[in-house]
Amino acid sequence: MALISVILPAYNEEENIHRAAERLSAVLAPERVDWELVFVNDGSRDRTWEKISEIAEENPHITGVRFSRNFGKEAAIMAGLACARGDCCVVMDCDLQHPPETVVEMLHLWQEGYEVVEGIKRSRGTESKLHALFAGTFYRIMSSATKIDMSRASDFKLMDRKAVDAILSLPEKNAFFRALSSWVGFRTTTVEFDVQEREAGTSKWSTRSLTGYAVRNIASFSSAPLQFITGFGGITLLLAMVMGIQTLIRYFSGNAVEGFTTVILLILLIGSMLMLSLGIIGYYLARIYEELKNRPRYLISEIISSRNNSEAGSGLFLDKRSQGG
Ligand code: UDP
Ligand code: MG
């Protein structure tokens, strides 16, 4: 019988673990598939891990993975995918904003032969105007960088084993999961879902972390900001020629003493543009340095699983790939 793995990254979600496990087992049990839930505790500061280990110990369908600290949702997704053994994997939030019923819909599409099923937001849920504006801008940039319409994309997706292995085999540490699942290709389809209200707890995203996330993802999928510098250099070169000719004409016509204001303005303009450009280049450099260090995406401190696989037990687990396994 086919095995479906559901991966649920969890960061400070103590109130949602039980609920998510219950709702998911209720919808998956009647299906003609074997199933497992992989909860990845992303270094929560509350009792999330206690909740996960409780249910993982009594329920053989549930696996708990514990990070040594908070590594972020992308890392948690990657760890979940690496530990999952399913013939297909579903990634969803464990705050139940992604409806469990949609998982069944995705499963049926997979059984029909689709290899990647993308969850598309029918509505964007409740968001403030400012948030919607920033999200809109980010997705426009990302869409043009990835050539995929990302405006309603989410992290809620089902992937066949083939696609999962393809994603796990990518060497980059700074992966943007939402775009990667389309990047790998395969027979893809979409299902629409309504973003639900959060069952309990609060969103983990602050404006600052969202901005950082947006910038990082743009940089990881596009080098457009670098080309922007070149473009700007071209424009300043044109301006320089115009100004140069004007200055020469003035010099030969004998009134070259004026123009001090122009000099100040030019120095200020060029100076700030140079520094901004250096900043952009420096940002890419930092990203390259980060990738070059080749540190694992996450560190696992504990895994609770009834399945007797090589990852079970306790100890320090590195990213599967860096173990060479
Ligand atoms: N999450 C995580 N690590 C983090 C932040 C969030 O694993 O550092 C998980 C979180 O537990 C939830 C999912 O990612 O299951 C989505 O987070 P959240 O609900 O805060 O984001 P939103 O739904 O507001 O976009
Ligand atoms: Mg949420």
Image: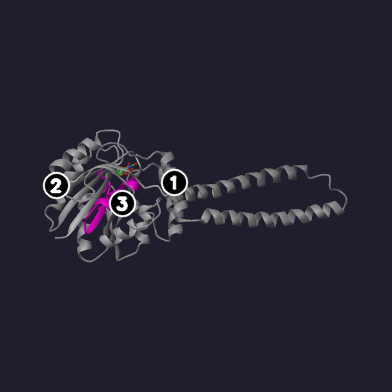
Q: Secondary structure at mark 3?
A: helix
Q: Which residue is mark 1?
A: 134
Residue at 12% over, 52% down: 29
What is the basis of the colouring in this image? Answer: one colour
Are there few (<14), some (14-19), or many (20+) residues within 10 Å of tag 3?
some
Q: Which mark is residue 320?
A: 3
Query: Vertical placement of 118 versus 263: above or below?
Result: below
Question: Residue 6's spot in the image, x, y percent?
Answer: 23, 51
Please tell me whether residue 83 belongs to the stretch shown in magenta.
Answer: yes
Q: Which mark is residue 316?
A: none
- What type is the residue that disc 3 sits on? Lys
* Disc 2 to disc 3, C-alpha distance: 23 Å
Question: Residue 84's spot in the image, x, y percent?
Answer: 24, 52
Give the mark, 1 or 2, whose residue is nearer the N terminus: 2
Question: Residue 30's spot in the image, x, y percent?
Answer: 11, 54
Nearer the observer, 299 or 46: 299
